[in-house]
Amino acid sequence: MTCGPPSADTCVLRYALERHAATRGEDVYAVFEDGTRWTFTETLALVRATAAGLQRLGVRRGDSVLVMLPNGPLGLRAMFAANYIGAISVPVNPAYRGSILEHVVADCGAAIAVVHPDCLDRLLEVPAAALKRIVVAAPEPDRAAPDGLELFGETVLLEGGGDPGPLAAPIAPWDTQSIIFTSGTTGRSKGVLSSYMHCYTAMNPETWTCTRADDRHLLHMPIFHIGGAFIASMALCVGASIAVVERFRTETFWPTVRRMDVTCVFLLGAMATFLLKRPPTQEDHAHPLRAVMIVPLGQAGPEFRARFGVDVFTLFNMTEISTPLISAANPAKPNICGRPRTGVEVRLVDAHDMPVPNGTPGELIIRADDPWTMTHGYHGRPEATAAAWRNGWFHTGDMFVCDDDGDFQFVDRLKDAIRRRGENISSYEVEVEILAHRDVREAAVVAVPSDVTEDEVLAVLAPVDGRWIDPAAIVAFLEPRLPPFMIPRYIRVVDELPKTPTAKVEKHLLRAIGLTPDCWDRVGRRALEDTSNVEETAT
């Protein structure tokens, strides 16, 4: 059992920031790529000034503030300032456009948006009945406001001086801090409601036991993702610091770690693979990084630790929950996600929510000891909320296996599972083995229709820079590593896999495209030439 939920002074951003500014104001909270640094005192002053600006624009407690900005000072100021006055931050992917953007804007109901100039035209093109004011991240807008809208330059958030008005009531740990939209790979994105307690619990050092209160976290995941927004807020609450970069870049990762004194970093499994595929250098151990979390772990852990001299951890998390599984340092087993942490109860269940025995795949469901430490629902989606929380447990939609040691291993997303001639196949397990090949930089495995029954397996691969992929060599490489039914029948080589801005492969696009004329068929040992085999399920 945990020691109880965190207090407001601990997890509510406003009160934690004020406490740190009062007790250790000259300590650095944030460093940016251009060398700018914010102390806790400076962070508080900027947040308060921006909060006063939001209030002058009409933002009140409980309102949503839409933020379409890349990682950087204004994005953090806008989110934190909204929270400072009890409003709800809604960070949105700056790449959104069209119907996706229209859906997100309508769903969150924000009356004010703070956006990058490149987003303005796209935002103005979508109907947004609630949206009344847009602040552009530029000194002044470069156009006149259309009917029904007011446009402002970013200086409106700092001009005018004054302090934000008083709160009508204290901000509580269970108040909504943010709405973060899921990636929406199988349907419309859902807005995940996150309380201050949820955000704090998801990543604080008691949950992420590999981290410390004096760490400097690399903020390279986007702020519309929990790997950006939650880490930034958590670090502020615990008194840690962040090094803010616009995005992950393989070629500059280690120079950035050294220059910005990064001690802790969260890496998606693909990012770790990219770093390992780079040529070794004499400086591979010359850096301040002490801990890295690789998710999913795959087989990269031992190699990453040996090459770069850091402690490797892994975990399982998603926007709606608060890291229920985490590993000890340097797990020896490949592909695991860790064991349940203190404060949560987990089960693996079948389609009827009945527990399955060790060694049997089941859906991971979760409940927490303390209230408000996971999502309290999907914004405006009572049916989706009820479905996710059925029988009093949150259903992740992910399949796992638990071994007799208590280690959980990810099997697949329920929707990504493949069934071939009576056998169930984990796309993830096939991808892990393919990525062990030295020529493969990225891999995605999806089901395509079989000409016999059930599914066939398609692997879409991207090569390491300067190398090329021989499909026959891939099959030969896999034959001693996988049972025959798991070896892909089809292989397609592309320059790069389609990915979301958070580096998740968009498998739904690969499934929709299906077989193409350039797919290599190991049954025929050739590229497909008969275009009648091409799946026309999407354009």
Image: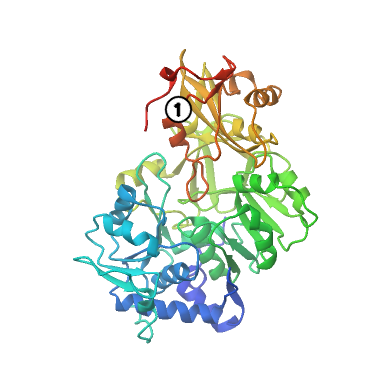
The relative height of residue 130 versus residue 518 in the rendered view (above or below) is below
Q: Quadrant of the C terminus?
A: top left
Looking at this rendering, what residue extends furthest in the top direction? 452
Residue drawn at point x = 47 percent, y = 12 percent: 452
Q: Quadrant of the N terminus?
A: bottom right
Q: Quadrant of residue 31?
A: bottom right
Residue drawn at point x = 37 percent, y = 31 percent: 538
| Residue ID for mark 1 | 514
Looking at this rendering, what residue extends furthest in the left direction? 147
What colouring style does the render use?
A: rainbow
Q: Quadrant of residue 437?
A: top right
Say whether residue 188 is left or right of residue 457: left
Secondary structure under tag 1 reads: loop
What is the x, y in percent for residue 232? Answer: 53, 65
Residue drawn at point x = 30 percent, y = 50 percent: 103
Amino acid under disc 1 = Gly
What is the x, y in percent for residue 159? Answer: 37, 83
How would you rate the neighbour count of disc 1 (Cα within 10 Å): few for under 14, some for 14-19, many for 20 or more?
A: many
What is the x, y in percent for residue 84? Answer: 41, 74
Residue drawn at point x = 66 percent, y = 54 percent: 292
What is the x, y in percent for residue 135? Answer: 34, 70
* Camera sees residue 358: no
* Camera sees residue 258: yes
Return the residue nearer the eye: 161 or 496.
496
Q: How many marks?
A: 1
Say whether residue 408 is left or right of residue 508: right
The relative height of residue 487 versus residue 262 in the rendered view (above or below) is above
